Amino acid sequence: MKTFLRIKLFLVPLPAFLIATAQGHGFAGALAGLVWTLGASVLRRGLRPPPPFEASLVVGFALAILALTVTALDPGRTVSLVMGSLAAGATVSILHGRPWTAGFSAAEFGGASATPLFISINTAISALWGALFAWLAVATWLALPALAHWLAVAAGAVASIVLPRLLVARGLRRMAAGDTRHAWPSPDLHASSAAAGEVVDVAVIGAGIGGLTAAALLADAGLRVEVFEQHEVPGGFAHTWLRRARACDPENGASLAFRFDAGVHDVSGWHPGGTVRSVFERLGIAHEDEWVRLDHRYVFDGRAIDVPRDWRAWVERLAAEFPHEAAGLRALFADIHAIHEAMFSTAAERGGIPGTPGTPQALLAFARRHPLAVTWLDRPWQDLVAHHLRDPAVQAWVCALAGYLSDDITRLRVRDFVPLFGYYFNGGYYPLGGSGLIAQRLVEAIEARGGRVHLRTAVTRIVTAQGTATGVVVRRRNGPEQTVRARAVVTNADLRQSLTRLLPQDDAPPEARIAEAHLQASCSAIGVNLAVKGTLDMPPVVHVADASGAVSIVIPSRVDPGCAPAGYSTVELLALMRPDEAHTWFADASTDGNLTEDHDHRAYRRSAPYLARKQAAGDRLIALARLAIPDLEQRILFRTDASPLTFQRYAWTSGGGIYGTRSDGMIPTKSAVRNLVVAGAATHGAGIEAVVISGAFAAEALVPGLLARTAA
């Protein structure tokens, strides 16, 4: 109703003009309307050009004045000129993506008016009024009876009052319900079962951090949980491995052992109140002395800058380096901080896990409190950056952490990228003992609550009955297959493999096959792990880029002495690789990087062409790393390289992808198969914090309200 009244107030000059025209004073009415509209525009926005619809009212009155002064047009028909101009203005506002009624609803609904829901509603209302103005233009020109005019106006008024409320209420209910593509009801996992001794409550495929998080939270809720992992260690890309150098220490003759991380080094969300820390505190496995904050250095095109721990100081450091973009940098970081705060504002009431408000009222309140966030969240990340910065070189510094998410920044939305700025706002951390400690602690939480984690045990099939997951078939290494019955299944395996290899195709719903068709492997990478002589006096994380490429350098031994013997260091290099290039690393490129029965690729990975290509790729990374560590090659004591084939061999991912599976849209937590939910990077993106969130969402999909509960 308020929106309708605001529209009527804006259009006050229009009925005044109609009355004046009916009384034979059309010129005076048009002139008064023109002065009123221009004056109101100047008061609202100064000398800035008015939006299309407001401009159309000015044009309409100007046309009426022109017609009355230089033509013999019937004064009554000048009304058609004004109405036609308004119809055109309404149409242009819709074509520009800024329906004219949105400006008025913004005053009533605040930031909510910028959401896709409100834009769609305002588009419909603006189109309705556009059609109404067009009809009034025709009816006036043809001199139709007054009833033809006023009935249309009355219908439009009623629709403008009633429709927005109905559409808003319906839309907010749908938004609060979340992704309803697979809206099967959650199973009652706490109900007693006649076969309770033979059935686990939840079987989890894969002991990545997403799967372990889901398992730990479900076990914490009192459920019987079993996790099945094909690898020798849990954690997925969050595990560590040891290598012993052939050489011995020249001073004491001692053997030299080094510890490396499989992929995870820099963890966000460990600050007080952060996502990862909140989940670990809930599970009783948070140990402050096991984590250390990391510092970063960027070396771009020969310019090296260390990142201060205070994000405001980082902004000022960049502003000093690029004074021509200083104002834009400050404004951009302020916007990013506001959006970041909005995104995590719901976490406290959900056990540290951010998410969409659960009721229409809460959604509306969120939008009113965080208008900037709802305006930008679903827009491309690069649009937000370009909104403030013009210099591509400065934009590159702001986007320096893009490699933590993807090899293709054009695919990322604001909601994808903004959480990365948590590294600036709250810090990134490394677990002392290596990334495997994260998995180790989660396994401890699961086992302390009666759950079990089975290593060297691959899931070969998801068992279904009438479109419902009822268990898994597992095979312990070199052993026979065994069926494990379960009331629900969490898949933390590569999603493409889950849908194509594990699901029985004769019982898979059509929606599962449709989803599979849209899935692609994420980017892969080339990795180099080095044991080097001497210590390195530099931050533990260094990002290097120049015209020849980019590489991330991590030196875990800078913060964790357990990585290397005294007087030595570990250096880990990583460079992302596009999926299409990654597929060329496999012996049979026609497989598109999909898993085959030969997971090990033993013969191919020992072939001379493959070994030469892998070494050459590693050499390029070492050459780039020399921009930050000039004498790196002379220090190398031990080296091992990893290719897309390596990542597939150990993690069983499509195309050796390191960031899960990407798709044309967001993957819902609930799959098309009833009682089968998804955890991992496919649903919430890459990174430990993101997959912890995904695991929490998977757990809550099976036990609604779980996150809002206190720990069991």
Image (cartoon, helix red, strand yellow):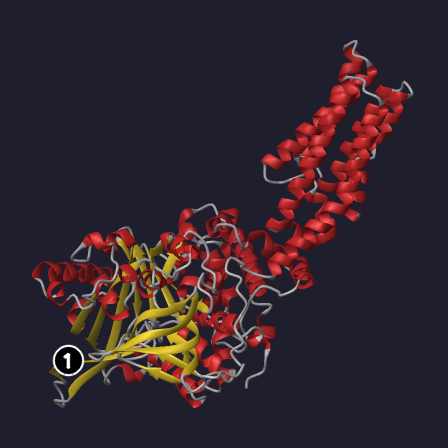
Q: Compared with residue 561, is residue 153 higher up or lower down, i.e. above or below?
A: above
Q: Quadrant of residue 435?
A: bottom left
Q: Is residue 177 left or right of residue 391?
A: right
Q: Secondary structure at mark 1?
A: strand
Residue at the location (62% across, 36% down)? 94
Residue at the location (53% across, 72% down)? 353
Instruction: Name the spot of residue 414 as percent of width and height, x first.
Output: 50, 55
Instruction: Name the spot of residue 684 as percent of width and height, x first.
Output: 45, 63
Mark 1 sits on what residue?
A: 245
Q: Is 177 or 656 nearer to us in this picture?
A: 177
Q: Quadrant of residue 646?
A: bottom left
Residue 293 seen from this side? no
User: Looking at numbered disc 1 in the image, what kind of residue is underneath it?
Assistant: Ala
- From this viewpoint, which residue is outermost toward the left? 608
Residue at the location (20% across, 52% down)? 590
Instruction: Name the spot of residue 265 as percent of width and height, x first.
Output: 35, 72
Instruction: Name the spot of residue 133 as percent of width and height, x first.
Output: 73, 29
Q: Is residue 644 left or right of residue 610?
A: right
Q: Quadrant of residue 636?
A: bottom left
Q: Is 44 or 510 nearer to us in this picture?
A: 510
Q: Is residue 679 left or right of residue 641?
A: right
How many numbered discs? Answer: 1
- From this viewpoint, which residue is outermost toward the right? 23
Q: Is 702 or 161 nearer to us in this picture?
A: 702
Q: Is 140 or 228 nearer to us in this picture?
A: 228
Q: Is residue 31 left or right of residue 55?
A: right
Q: Quadrant of the C terminus?
A: bottom right
Q: Compared with residue 190, is residue 160 higher up or lower down, i.e. above or below?
A: above
- From this viewpoint, which residue is outermost toward the top? 72
Circle 1 Cα neighbour tier, 10 Å, few/some/many (<14 / 14–19 / ≥20): some
Residue 92 seen from this side? yes
